[in-house]
């Protein structure tokens, strides 16, 4: 338990410096530098084969790195087996027993992590409610639908309240409403000081994370908050204004130094910061307005082209 | 991390829950032995070599003696008295003995190994008729045959105990190999690797969980063998169970070890000719070890079923206790288990590359 307190004070849950891994001639991780601060949700994005899963497997030492330095919860990665009880790892394989019931699968994983009966029952109940499987607890896991199976796998991964959660594509096949629930839960965990690392190829998921890293060909193409990434890619939010006298107002905005376009009578202001909205509205009073945030997807597309 | 019995128990409970739900496998475990016994119960015998035969010569049958000595398949041990011969047969040192006395020939046979007994009896019979022809006189020397264990054994009696070992070995090996293949393909193995569960705990949990089904299988097989087929059970069923549990544990770790060389359940089935068949052929189940060609025989002595079959026969037919089968049978089974336990544990690698 003393261990846990210590971990919380550390700033980085995972830090990788010049991490390299090749499979044969193929270099999957290429001098990768990556920091995951503790107590937040971090999304690792990237196309298939960019090295996301390899990186996660390296964190838990399912494969040995060729070079570089990596620390996990403050320990060198070579000692990570000593803190397995603080790590929750959800693979793309789901890792469930189809011939056990939902409840039995949960009990099995709870037992592996040494949860006592009382604590076990409470935790199972809480998690099954979160993943919306409470009424299916007596069903065989093999009889569940793909999405339900996925949800059970997530619940099993969370059973021991890990400090560091490594979730490899956790929301594949989950409907949007439940995905929202997951994200709320992940953010709550982050609020409690736990670190949640998620890989995905869905942009809208990445936007829900506190930090995003974009991997490409085994390297970090960009990392930061979703907003930072957009800025890095040179993308700005656009304020669309429907005005009574578009030409006059446009001229005024131009005079104040704003970058604007006029498309079909609608004035579009490219904002540097969201705070500028107030300044714009102090100058003019539109009939109607809409703020368009740039898509993260676009940002990454630009970054991909740039690298 | 020190091994935890709690985690071993958690794995064992899970294995039991899974097997319990698999009705077809349970059915197979229980009924396959019965079918096997009916199918093979009346099997064949082959040519033999290396039969240990005692010879007590009180004179009067020089020609008969010469003939028996000329049979190169017999390893003859000369001894002074009938009681010596009887004692060695009881201890399993001799397969039989021939007592030559003026006017009488007595044959002592080990009843627990019928093919060998048959071969000895036939050889003596042949020698006697040869002697009769040679001497050209009507010297009638009655041949008295006596079985040491006092009952007429049927083929089933010798095969039954060995089948008990065979079925346990077969099903545990296959089920364990498939279970470990599944752990791999389901991704659960990878998940264990990133959990406090150690490799030793995992395999121990399997051994524990599977043991319950080994007990179930052995109990039903023993019941059928003794009550259905009338095979004597001289020793304690608990002793027999101990042998079978040790054999089952060995088969489990062997299955776990070999699962590393298969990529699918289908490929596990392909191990049958490689792993199971040699045991059936070479372990003295259907025909005695003595009929296995000498150059392959050393191979028989590294197969666990050889020792299990020998020990089970000793327990069931001769009433042997644990102390009687400790060496070499239980020792060999124990070594086999430990070697493959270590091998299976080492093969469950954490780092894949």
Image (tube, coloured by chain):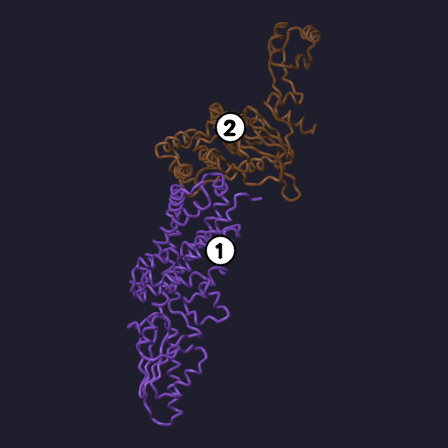
Q: Where on the picture, by quarter, is residue B112?
A: bottom left
Q: Name the disc covering residue B244, or none.
A: none
Tell whether label 1 touches label 2 (CB within 8 Å): no
Residue A55 in sight from this viewpoint: yes
Instruction: Tell me the SS state at disc 2.
Output: strand
Quarter in which the N terminus of chain B is drawn: top left
Q: Is residue A89 above or below residue B298?
A: above
Chain A display color: brown
| Residue located farthest toward the front when viewing the structure as drawn | B80
- The spot of residue A140 in percent (x, y) is 41, 40
Q: Identify the residue under disc 1.
A: B269
- The spot of residue A52 in percent (x, y) is 59, 35
Q: Identify the residue under disc 2.
A: A195
The subunit carrying tag 2 is A
Distance from disc 2 to disc 1, alpha carbons, whole Å, reads: 44 Å
Mark 1 neighbour class, 10 Å CA radius: few under 14, some 14 to 19, many 20 or more: some
**Which chain wears purple?**
B
Label 2 vs label 1, nearer the camera: 2
The subunit carrying tag 1 is B
Q: Where on the picture, by quarter, is residue A227?
A: top right
Which sits in the foreground, B332 or A134?
Answer: B332
Q: Is residue B9 above or below residue A71?
A: below
Instruction: Tell me if A181 is positioned left or right of B62 in this view.
Output: right
- The spot of residue B263 in percent (x, y) is 53, 50
Q: Where on the picture, by quarter, is residue A156?
A: top left
Q: Which residue: 34% across, 80% down?
A: B80
């Amino acid at each position: 338990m003393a261990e846990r307190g210590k971990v919380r004070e550390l700033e980085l849950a995972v830090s990788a410096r010049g991490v390299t891994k090749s499979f044969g001639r193929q270099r999957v991780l290429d001098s990768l530098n990556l920091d995951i601060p503790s107590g937040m949700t971090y999304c690792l994005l990237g196309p298939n084969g960019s090295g996301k899963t390899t990186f996660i497997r390296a964190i838990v030492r399912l494969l040995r790195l060729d070079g570089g330095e990596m620390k996990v919860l403050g320990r060198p990665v070579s000692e990570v087996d000593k803190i397995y009880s603080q790590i929750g790892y959800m693979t793309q394989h789901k890792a469930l027993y189809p011939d056990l019931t939902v409840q039995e699968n949960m009990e099995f994983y709870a037992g592996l992590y040494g949860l006592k009966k009382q604590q076990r029952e409470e935790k199972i109940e809480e998690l099954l409610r979160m993943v919306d499987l409470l009424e299916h607890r007596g069903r065989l896991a093999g009889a569940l639908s793909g999405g339900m199976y996925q949800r059970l796998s997530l619940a099993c991964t969370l059973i021991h309240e890990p400090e560091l959660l490594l979730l490899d594509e956790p929301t594949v096949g989950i409907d949007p409403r439940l995905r929202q629930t997951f994200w709320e839960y992940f953010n709550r965990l982050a609020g409690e000081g736990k670190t949640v690392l998620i890989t995905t190829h869905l942009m809208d998921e990445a936007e829900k994370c506190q930090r995003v890293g974009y991997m490409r060909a085994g390297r970090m193409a960009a990392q930061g908050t979703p907003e930072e990434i957009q800025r890095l890619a040179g993308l700005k939010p656009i304020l669309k204004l429907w005005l009574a006298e578009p030409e006059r107002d446009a001229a005024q905005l131009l005079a104040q130094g704003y970058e604007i376009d006029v498309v079909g009578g609608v004035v579009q202001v490219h904002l540097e910061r969201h705070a500028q909205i107030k300044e714009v509205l102090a100058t003019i009073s539109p009939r109607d307005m809409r703020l368009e945030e740039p898509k993260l997807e676009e940002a990454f597309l630009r970054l991909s082209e740039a690298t | 991390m020190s091994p935890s019995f709690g985690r071993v128990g958690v794995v064992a409970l899970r294995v039991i829950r899974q097997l319990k739900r698999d009705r077809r496998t349970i059915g197979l475990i229980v009924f396959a032995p019965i079918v096997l016994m009916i199918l093979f119960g009346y099997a064949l015998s082959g040519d033999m070599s290396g039969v240990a035969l005692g010879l007590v010569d009180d004179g009067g049958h020089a020609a008969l003696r010469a003939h028996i000595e000329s049979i190169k398949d017999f390893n003859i041990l000369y001894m002074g008295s009938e009681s010596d011969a009887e004692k060695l047969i009881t201890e399993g040192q001799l397969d039989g003995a021939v007592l030559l006395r003026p006017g009488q020939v007595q044959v002592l046979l080990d009843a627990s190994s019928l093919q060998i007994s048959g071969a000895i009896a036939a050889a003596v019979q042949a020698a006697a008729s040869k002697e009769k022809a040679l001497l050209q006189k009507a010297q009638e020397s009655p041949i008295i045959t006596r079985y040491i264990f006092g009952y007429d054994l049927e083929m089933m009696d010798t095969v039954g105990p060995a089948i008990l070992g065979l079925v346990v070995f077969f099903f545990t090996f296959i089920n364990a190999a498939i279970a470990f293949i599944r752990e791999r393909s389901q991704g659960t193995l990878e998940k264990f690797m990133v959990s406090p569960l150690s490799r030793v705990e995992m395999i121990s949990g399997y051994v524990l969980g599977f043991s319950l089904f080994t007990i179930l299988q052995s109990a039903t097989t023993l019941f059928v063998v003794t009550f259905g087929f009338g095979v004597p059970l001289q020793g304690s069923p608990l002793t027999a169970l101990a042998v079978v549990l040790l054999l089952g544990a060995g088969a489990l770790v062997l299955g776990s070890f070999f699962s590393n060389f298969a990529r699918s359940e289908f490929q596990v089935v392909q191990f049958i000719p490689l792993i199971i068949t040699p045991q059936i052929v070479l372990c003295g189940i259907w025909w005695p070890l003595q009929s296995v060609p000498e150059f392959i025989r050393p191979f028989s002595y590294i197969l666990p079923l050889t020792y299990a079959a020998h020990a089970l026969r000793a327990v069931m037919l001769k009433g042997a206790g644990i102390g009687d089968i400790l060496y070499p049978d239980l020792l060999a089974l124990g070594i086999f288990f430990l070697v493959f336990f270590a091998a299976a544990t080492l093969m469950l690698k954490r780092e894949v590359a």
